[in-house]
Image: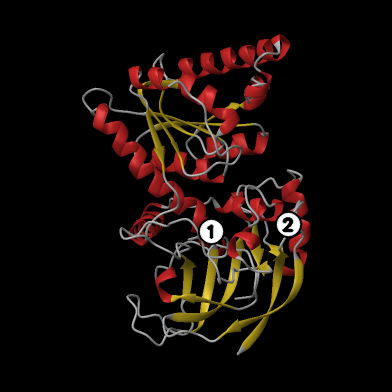
Amino acid sequence: MQSTQAWLLPVGQEQNPGPGRLELGRISLGELQPDEALVEPLFAGWEGNCFHAVQRKPIDVCASRGEPSVVLGNSGVVRVLRPPTAPNDDGLREGDVCLLQANYKPDVFGYGQNGAAFGYDAPGTIGLLAKRTKIRGSCLVPLPPHTRHSLEQWAAFSVRYVTAYANWRVAYGTWRLQVTEQDQRTPYVWGWGGGTSFAELTLAVLLGAEATIVTSTENRMALAKANGLSAVDRRRFPDIAFDERRAKDPDYMRRYQESEKTFLRIVHETTHGMGASIFVDYIGGTSMRATLAALAREGVVTTAGWREGLRSTFMRAIECIERHQHIHTHYARRSEVLEAMALGEERGWMPPADALEKPHPYDQVPQLVSAYAAGNISTYFPLIRVNSY
């Protein structure tokens, strides 16, 4: 039975859990099952779900799993140290470098269920913030032989780009059910800034759309333009995040409406008066009012996450009359992982190499956590070097 070093998130206090802190310790890996591989993580991504787990919002993942502590990390690349003894589709071998496919509990159609995310809410899993871990062979996908992309790019690709690919398939397909190529050849795609939004918008451009990202820093606007996107500075409408609880405050509503008016004017100027065909909104909650107002008729609002809200409010009658479609997905099934990786390798749809910062050393993970919480990480794709390669 092996033990290994790992960054542990302890369970919160039952009555007042509050934000947690990662602690460096040792854990036992337990016995390897025939379908499990022993791996060493090379690079792990620090994802939004990792931040939510440390903040214990919306849940305490430790309490949810019924465990005293968990090891986070559900994106990245690993090296196989000992392949599964049971047969597997990829014929995994010692030394293979693989992308982590984090869907640990697929339903009958292969999509993840609640409690399915390896290294997050899937009970018993040990994430990539451990020096060694074990994982089912079905959750490892070997990188393309002689790939032209770096391991750091693949690690950043792991969750964000796969999620974006799977979400785009449904969103674009839904839009085309109502608006044919004869009706409108080129969709106008918008999105609130973030790593997965950036991935999805650059995919949209690759496949023939016109896409615009809303962000608020000069370097991210430059990154967007260098990768085929239009960029709009969110600072031009500073009060666009809508708080329903303050709707009866006249001064607050005046400021919100001024921001919304500016935002909608820019959207309509950019889309020749039509509005957004597809709006990628991974924020939720505070963004939904402006997102829906920006949609064209027969437009699609699409998401695979809920950064700022588990609940959204909208007028069903208006959404019906406008024929707006609301798409909700969450990560992907294995076939979509394979398709996304093939597209990334062949067409160069990847996190841009110049958008990646130097990976954080393993012993400095707490500093990364603090910087991320304070909004002091400039890259969309923060990475951690767990082991050398």
Q: Which mark is residue 36?
A: none
In the rendered image, residue 227, in percent from the top left (x then y), is placed at: 50, 40
Q: Quadrant of residue 132?
A: bottom right
Give the SS element for disc 1: helix
Q: Residue at x 38, y 52 (%)?
A: 347
Q: Residue at x 60, y 59 (%)?
A: 64
Is residue 71 positioned above or below 35 on the image? above
Of the 4 image quadrants, the one containing the C terminus is bottom right
User: Mark 2 — residue?
Assistant: 14
Most foreground residue, 5 or 314: 314
- On screen, residue 323 versus residue 26, left or right, reads left
Is residue 236 positioned above or below 86 on the image? above
In the rendered image, residue 190, in percent from the top left (x then y), is placed at: 47, 30
Q: Label 2 is placed on what type of residue?
A: Glu
Q: Badge 2: how crowded within 10 Å, few (<14), some, or many (20+)?
A: few
Of the 4 image quadrants, the one containing the N terminus is bottom right
